[in-house]
Amino acid sequence: MRAEALEAPAAAERLLAENAAEVRSLARFLRKRPPAFVQTVARGSSDHAALFGKYLFEARLGWVTSSAAPSVVTVYGARPRLAGALVIALSQSGASVDLVESLRAARSAGALTVAVVNVEDSPLAHAAEVVLPLHAGAEKSVAATKSYLTMLVALAQIVAHVEEAPDLEEALPLLPEQMALAAGADWSAGLELFEPAGDAYVVGRGYAFAVANEAALKLKETSALHAEAFSAAELLHGPVAIVGPGYPVLTLAPYDRPYPQVVELLAGLKEKGAELAVASSEPEALALADAPLPLQRRFHPVLDSVLTVQAFYPFAEALARARGYDPDRPRNLQKVTQTR
Amino acid sequence: MRAEALEAPAAAERLLAENAAEVRSLARFLRKRPPAFVQTVARGSSDHAALFGKYLFEARLGWVTSSAAPSVVTVYGARPRLAGALVIALSQSGASVDLVESLRAARSAGALTVAVVNVEDSPLAHAAEVVLPLHAGAEKSVAATKSYLTMLVALAQIVAHVEEAPDLEEALPLLPEQMALAAGADWSAGLELFEPAGDAYVVGRGYAFAVANEAALKLKETSALHAEAFSAAELLHGPVAIVGPGYPVLTLAPYDRPYPQVVELLAGLKEKGAELAVASSEPEALALADAPLPLQRRFHPVLDSVLTVQAFYPFAEALARARGYDPDRPRNLQKVTQTR
């Protein structure tokens, strides 16, 4: 897991170079004929990458994005009305039957179908009109790392080209180097806080909420730690009820638009006595933490969430070992999961 | 909380009668001009009601449904492309600023806007073109019950009239009586299982997954029990890693299309040594349970999920007391939460 997480920067560099022409051509088409809306089709980590895509598409392009519930097609037998939509399936293996069936239904309904996959010779890739490979190389660890990170990069590359936004277009080529830097972040302060934890929350907002979902899943998979992700806003609509003295909360607070609200939330959680681990580039947020998890200085408001996960993965790996688990052999899981 | 949960059947009866004309007129319009897609705007319990709506709209009408992330509008300042969409905001109070702002943005973008609210004289109701009141009467308990249940009924009423499906149209008038029956279900077997629990999963699929989210939130709010909901399929894509001997899982297994897969999952969880509480009308599913939570006999595949929550609320109330909490005074929460 650790080795594969550290391969992500090189994979991202390959992806940005090798997919450039295909993404440019897709973006040209989408600018001329913007989709009525976007649907993402994915499971597990890939579905959390899709959520990052939702924030990108909605906040930067105004394209409303829906996450498919595969059972709608595979169990209820419905045929969603997807003419004019952009449907993006995301999967490391490209082998999950329910995703393939959902993508086929979308294509026959008249959607433009894109597969973002690591295994190019896979049923999901064959079912799609446009294939964007992740170029991540074989991923053997059950806990996805480099495939998740490259999915985020692939989605950001699409949006950068559609939007023709100088900020993203200029930042993306510099991202792999920044990822390599993030992979070396020292988050050891978090080990002591989470080593004895029975359960925990992971909190973020916007792009950072999207990646908080991936962090929570990874803590479950590798550390058998029941971590659940909430947006900083949603937390206040109920889930905060279980936060009392000593309750561990990992807050992802890269510098982005929601940053002020996240700092306000941190102050409120501190008052309730929560044990706070805070991942941030900002001294102000880190100062509120019982366990500060430093991020390098601000790079880009969207891509700093990518860097947060890149910094998180080696931490998750070390935490699993500290808790007595082998992160390369999560309980009860196989690499490719078949569901319908 | 208990008293208000028991008022839900009467509220549902009022809602079905008093909203009939308005819903029929909305449905006539929607049949003539089906929306390009649906967006729901909600937080907390209401957002879980919206998820029930997503399954209804997608599985029965083929209308792809997206849950709005309010921060897209309120924090990132985006203007989602919603012309031709149906946008439904759901809220007990109708007072949350971020929902009002999102609904206004949708209306000015050309969406057809509907507010499903309990407080008719509220900013959210005033911002919408169509208002469907919940007729639930004042809801004072911080933990929503009758407002959540009537939201499910309001969404089912819309779909029944749009689809003109005899099964739903015939079942809905009988629903209040069935709800009253469900409220008397004997789930005492579950108290012993969850009284000492540190955390738990709540599992369902399809409509039952939608309501599993509400059950998990209510366990957090009233019992300070960290319960998290997963679809029976998604569970296998990672979260099952923390399920070992003695791990408590509440499975909602009303009789619906996904029922066979849910029973298969139950058998797998049993093998892992999980402590299973199972809510079902079916002897086969109940027989797999350490704590069987009986539901009355099958009524309707969609509406049986409504009955499951109706049976769950008094159980949640009793569990809170057994764990030493006052369900009417959840920690850290107010009735109306303001977020942006």
Image: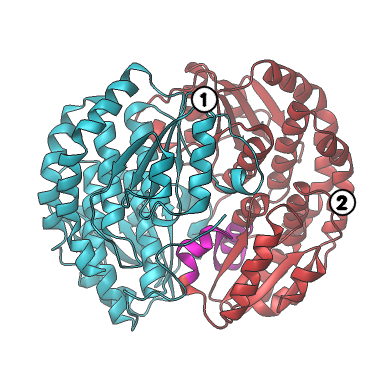
Chain colours: A cyan, B red
Residues shaded magenta: B215-240
| Residue under the image location 74 percent in, 18 percent down | B28
Instruction: Identify the subunit bearing mark 2.
Output: B
Q: Using a 10 Å C-alpha cutoff, classify the residue at mark 2 as few (fewer than 14 neighbours), some (14 to 19) or many (20 or more).
A: many
Q: B82 above or below B262?
A: above
Magenta span contains residue B228: yes
Label 1 in the same subunit as label 2: no
Residue A71 x %, y %? 60, 48
For the residue pair A50 and A238, the one nearer the viewer reads as: A50
The residue nearer to you, when weighing B273 against B248, is B273
| Chain of the residue where label 1 is placed in the rendered structure | A
Residue at numbered disc 2: B178
**Residue B228 found in image quarter:** bottom right
Q: Which residue is mark 1?
A: A83
Q: On the rendered structure, is A120 left or right of B10?
A: left
Quadrant where the C terminus of chain A sits is bottom right
Q: Judge whether A111 appears above or below A219 on screen.
A: above
Identify the secondary structure beneath mark 1: loop
Q: Position of residue B89 (x, y in %)?
A: 58, 32
Image: B162 above or below B295: above
Find residue A81 and report its image quarter.
top right
For image coordinates 43% across by 56% down, the residue present is A44
Is the N terminus of chain A in the top left, top right, bottom left or bottom right quadrant? bottom left
- The three-letter code of the residue at mark 2 reads Gln
Q: Is residue A48 left or right of residue A252?
A: right
Picture layout, residue A192 above or below residue A2 = below
**Could one spot residue B16 in this view of the protein?**
yes
